Image (tube, rainbow, N blue to C red):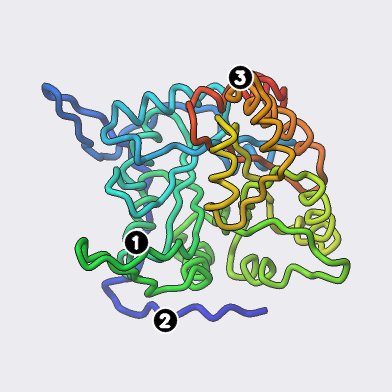
């Protein structure tokens, strides 16, 4: 399968060679901003791409930029997650929030490796290119590219969906930078795609995932699924197709804080799978939040044994502290 790369011939869009820069946080009174210049980076242990190469199982977690109106609040979230994860994922939502590129720059100076989410809903091709090149220049080494969920039209707010470029086209553009003779982008830069888990038939083949891999995807993040039998059947077909030779698979999980939260995820998150047994267990628990941590830890521990699953990404609708609690209880990543 050959993915055609749209022409990027405009001389003003020719990507420069990104140079690693650091961002020094400067404080004046109650204000904080970034002064970006080529200075030495804060040392960190290992990046996400390095962890995938050297570790049997990698753990990442979502940072909620909607809950981080400034650098201090972002740092507070990351300090909670830092001991427990190999990288943090920065979501790209339609909310009025800190930009992912700015957040990535702040985290890199703190020695945390960000996986930057980029969706094709909010920006046209030129804006996507500029944001990506800027992120790479700041030191980002992994992005997750997705189409983005369509926003309902609002005359009051004047919100419009862009969708100028398809996710596959943007992945192919990044791949072209990786293959460029001028070394515009590191050849081992990681590009991710997303997908939904389901119980496949015996003759199912992952054609869509193959197209994403051909376009340049190095890892695929799967939607949250609390039924590991479904995950096993799905991954068995993936392994049989030998797609795991080219792509790392990340499974999403969550320490749910309550039965109501479990039902909300089941009913509102596209592609999410939350079984009735999980909801019943949460309903019957004397301490639902603690039960949610236990369930997540059990699934995380078992998930690490499923062939083809390289990593897990945790997010939560509750307290952020439940994420390191679940990781610690699972034992998949001692800290």
Which residue has dot 1 on it? 16
Q: Earlier in the sequence, mark 1 or mark 3?
A: 1
Q: Is residue 25 left or right of residue 269?
A: left
* Viewer-side residue, 136 vs 300: 300
Indicate which label's residue lies in the foreground, 1 or 3: 3
Q: Identify the residue shown where x is 27% and y is 36%.
A: 69
Which residue has dot 3 on it? 287
Q: Residue furthest left?
A: 29
* Viewer-side residue, 80 vs 177: 80
Q: Residues within 10 Å of mark 3 (few under 14, many from 20)?
A: few
Q: Is residue 273 left or right of residue 145?
A: right
Q: Identify the residue shown where x is 45% and y is 62%.
A: 149
Q: Earlier in the sequence, mark 3 or mark 2?
A: 2
Q: Check residue 7 in the rendering and tell me which mark sits there, or answer none.
A: 2
Indicate which label's residue lies in the foreground, 3 or 2: 3
Residue 283 in sight from this viewpoint:
yes
Q: Secondary structure at mark 3?
A: loop
CA separation in Å, label 1 and label 2: 17 Å
Q: Residues within 10 Å of mark 1 (few under 14, many from 20)?
A: some
Q: Secondary structure at mark 1?
A: loop
């Amino acid at each position: 399968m050959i993915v055609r790369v749209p022409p990027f011939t405009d001389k003003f869009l020719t990507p420069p060679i990104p140079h690693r820069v650091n961002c020094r946080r400067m404080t004046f009174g109650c204000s904080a901003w970034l002064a970006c210049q080529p200075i030495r980076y804060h040392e960190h242990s290992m990046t996400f791409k390095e962890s995938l190469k050297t570790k049997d199982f990698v753990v990442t977690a979502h940072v909620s930029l909607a809950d981080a109106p400034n650098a201090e609040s972002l740092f507070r979230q990351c300090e909670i997650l830092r001991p427990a994860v190999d990288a943090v994922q920065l979501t790209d939502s339609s909310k009025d929030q800190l930009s992912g590129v700015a957040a990535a720059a702040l985290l890199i100076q703190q020695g945390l490796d960000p996986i930057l989410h980029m969706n094709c809903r909010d920006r046209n091709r030129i804006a996507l290119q500029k944001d990506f090149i800027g992120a790479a220049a700041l030191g980002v080494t992994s992005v997750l590219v997705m189409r983005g969920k369509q926003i309902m039209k609002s005359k009051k707010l004047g919100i419009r969906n862009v969708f100028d470029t398809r996710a596959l086209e943007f992945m192919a553009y990044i791949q072209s930078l990786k293959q460029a003779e001028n070394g515009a982008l590191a050849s081992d830069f990681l590009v991710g795609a997303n997908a939904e888990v389901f119980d496949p038939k015996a003759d199912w083949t992952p054609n869509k995932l193959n197209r994403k891999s051909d376009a340049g995807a190095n890892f695929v993040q799967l939607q949250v699924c609390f039924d590991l039998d479904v995950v096993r059947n799905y991954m068995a077909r993936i392994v049989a197709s030998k797609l795991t030779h080219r792509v790392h698979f990340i499974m999403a999980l969550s320490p749910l804080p309550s039965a109501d939260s479990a039902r909300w995820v089941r009913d509102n998150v596209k592609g999410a799978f939350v079984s009735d047994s999980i909801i019943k267990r949460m309903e019957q628990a004397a301490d639902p939040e603690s039960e949610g941590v236990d369930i997540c830890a059990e699934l995380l521990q078992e998930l690490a044994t499923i062939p083809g699953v390289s990593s897990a990404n945790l997010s939560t609708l509750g307290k952020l502290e439940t994420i390191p609690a679940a990781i610690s209880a699972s034992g998949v990543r001692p800290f």
